[in-house]
Structures are given as structure tokens and as C-alpha cells.
Amino acid sequence: MSAGIYLHIPFCKSRCSYCDFATDVLRSNDAVERYVDAICSEIRNSKFEIRNSTDSIYFGGGTPSLLNPAQVKKILNSVFSEFSVATNSEITMEMNPATVTPESLAAYRALGVNRASFGVQTFDDHALKLLARGHDANDARATFQMLREAGFDNVSFDLIAGLPGQTLDAWEQNLDEAIAMSPEHLSLYLLEIHEGTPLAEQLRSNRQPTPDPELAAEMYEIMLDRLAVAGYEQYEISNFSKRGRESRHNSKYWTLDPVFGFGVSAHSFDGRERYANERDTAKYVELIEQQTSAETNRESIDIASEYVFLGLRLEEGIDRSQYTERFGEDLIGKYQSEIERLLDSDLIEINNNRIKLTRKGKLFSQRGFCRVCLVDRVIPIFGARSDRRVWF
């Protein structure tokens, strides 16, 4: 089993109005250099009990493309010195439009970065201003073209549905343009409102219209139909790819493979326990400089519960035999009454020994109404954004 490596780069040019992640506005290159030194030190001094080989490395953020190539090289050198990295590894970098140049992209490619994930979010310039994204739609188009010209043949980008004031026509235009660009991977999310963000305050004070969950559900159904016709396969509740281009790194979270995280707010999972780093960037750097570790929390998890919770996110669902082999009990027998209730409600189906969500189940889950008691506690199937941050 190969582990994943996650590297959190918190710096951004500005903070998006909806963002609740561990990010900091970029203020000086000296601060970036100090942070890079800290994350390299953490990698060199990590004491994970399981030192797996790795076949995926993911620069997430924040805006990792604000790092210059020399800084990226320094971090990668630290990873390669401490881990056995497979020659065919997927190395992903998150990028924001208008933060890269042909020269920087060529340098990233030369360092081995072979997958790009960049946040388009929407092709509507008015909505981009609402979200305080710091780029416009033409920046996104230009960035995509630069990626292709730099030799990136594995590109993913994000779109968000259910924005304040967003119409069905606007959403369909977003989908049409995304499909026409033909990236290898698409991550499509419904907007989440987090307390403490500027967007949450704008909605509370009625400066922006509250998103309509019924309309967002309709957007989700349109998305499923359009992408299927365009040749994209849904492999996870919010993720779609051309065949063979599923995100190797993201998939590790959903199948409970080990993932070792480095940097501020990074989380790790070694197969038994989760580890969390300090969330404040300045404190993270100080802790690394003083004691080589910034871990602030660790917890043992109920693996069987997580296996069900995350497995239901996947298009293939949960294999009943694999569950029994892994946990020594029959899933259907353990949760018979709950499963019968969900079957009667047409929220799940059982085919060829697999339990998976129906289309209705996906829709209810995206609307936030579906809570499924297949574990020892009632948990939302889609309570967290379904990407590398599923534990953040």
C-alpha cells in the first residue's frame, strides 16, 4: 500500500470571501522562505511509525503556485530524501489563475510536477468579484492555455454551484465552457457557508441573497447529466474524470490509505490514528524551529465507521465482502434495520454485493438532508468537501 504526501502551502494573494481553510495573505518572500525551511525541517524530522513508499505528492493550499521553482525544488528534495517515491508518482500542484507564467510552469514540469489543479470556481466575472477570487474568467482561460503549452496533460479544475444569485442558465454556461475546455478532471462543489467568513456575514446582513438549496439540487442533477454525455465518469460524489484520470492522491483519503501531511494545519493518517498540526502559520513555524514538531492533536479513529462513511462517497460504493474481510463482520447484518430503511426510501441500492447511493441518495446528500445511521453515530454522508481536505 503506497502512502500519499500532502504539503500545505498557506499563502494567497488575497483571502476569498468563503474560505475557511488555513491560509495567510502573502506579505514577504522572507516569510515564505522561513516557512519553506520549516516544512522541510518537519519532513526531515518526521517520526511516523509507518514509512511507506509513496506514489502521490500533493501541494495544496492556499496558493502553492506562489512558490518559486527553487522553493518547490527544496521541498521536493526533502520529500525524496525521506521517502521512497515511485517513479510514476502523481505530483499535483494547486494553482490559482493569474499566479503562473509560462516560465514558472515549465520549471514546475521540469521538477516533476505532472498534474495541475486550479480554482476556476466560475466563469462569471461578477460572481468572481463576489467571492473575492482575485482573478477574472479570462485569467482562468489564459492559465489553462499556458498549462497545455507547458505540457500539462493532466489538468483538473474546480467549479462551485449554488452561489448567491446564481441562475440555472449561469450554471449551465459554466458547465458548457468547462466541458469545451476538456480538462482531464473536474471537481464540482456546492457552496458551503462557514461561520466567521466574510460571505457568511454578507448573507447574515442581507447584502447577498441566500442561496436556494432547491435550485442547487437542480444544478447538481444537470451536472450529472451533462458530464455523463461529455464522457466524464463520476467516481466520487463531487469528482469526475476522463477514464483513467481519477485523482490518485484524493482517492487515498476515501479508501483510508495512509497520508502523511506536512505544513500548517496539515493532517496525517497512518492507518490507525490521525495527527493534526498547528493551524496558525506563525505558531507552526515557531514550533518547528523550536522542537521540530507542530503536532497539536492526535486521535484514534473508528476505522469501520470511517470506511462506511467514506466508501458511500465513492461511485463504486462499499464492497460487502471486502468489509467483512477487513473488519470481521457483515455490514448488512450489523446495520440491517438502517439499510432496510434506506432501501425503502430509494437512497441506496445493493447490486453484486455492493452497497452504493442511488441518484436520489446523491441528490438528497448534496442538499444536506440525508443523514445515514450506518455507523455508531448519525453522520452526514457529505458533511465535508470531498477532496484532500476531507479531514480538515
Image (spheres, rainbow, N blue to C red):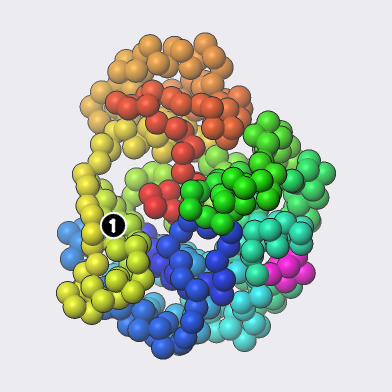
As drawn, is 102 to the left or to the right of 116?
Answer: right
In percent of width and height, residue 305 lies at 32, 33
Neighbourhood count class around disc 1 (C-alpha, 10 Å): few under 14, some 14–19, many 20 upward: many
Label 1 sits on a secondary structure element that is: strand
Total numbered labels: 1
Whole-percent x, y for residue 84 in the image: 30, 69
- Residue 9 visible, this orientation: yes
Residue 141 vs 379, above or below: the answer is below
- In the rendered view, does 248 fall on the left or right side of 273? right
Q: Main secondary structure of the magenta part?
A: helix
Pick whichever, 61 or 157, lies toward us: 61
Asked if one can make out residue 182 in the rendered structure from this viewpoint, the answer is no
Point out the stretch of residues depicted in magenta.
Answer: 135-140
Residue drawn at 48 percent across, 48 percent down: 195
What's the amino acid at mark 1? Ala
Q: Is residue 65 magenta?
A: no
Rendered residue at 29%/63% (across/down): 278
Residue under numbered circle 1 = 276
Q: Position of residue 277 (x, y in %)?
A: 29, 62
Q: Measuring 58% from the left and 83% from the top, which residue is drawn there?
A: 104
- Answer left or right for 371 relative to 150: left
Residue 208 to residue 83: above or below:
above
Q: Is residue 138 magenta?
A: yes
In this view, the residue in front, 184 or 261, is 261
Residue at image coords 36%, 79% = 35
Give the vertical position of 364 relative to 36 (above or below).
above
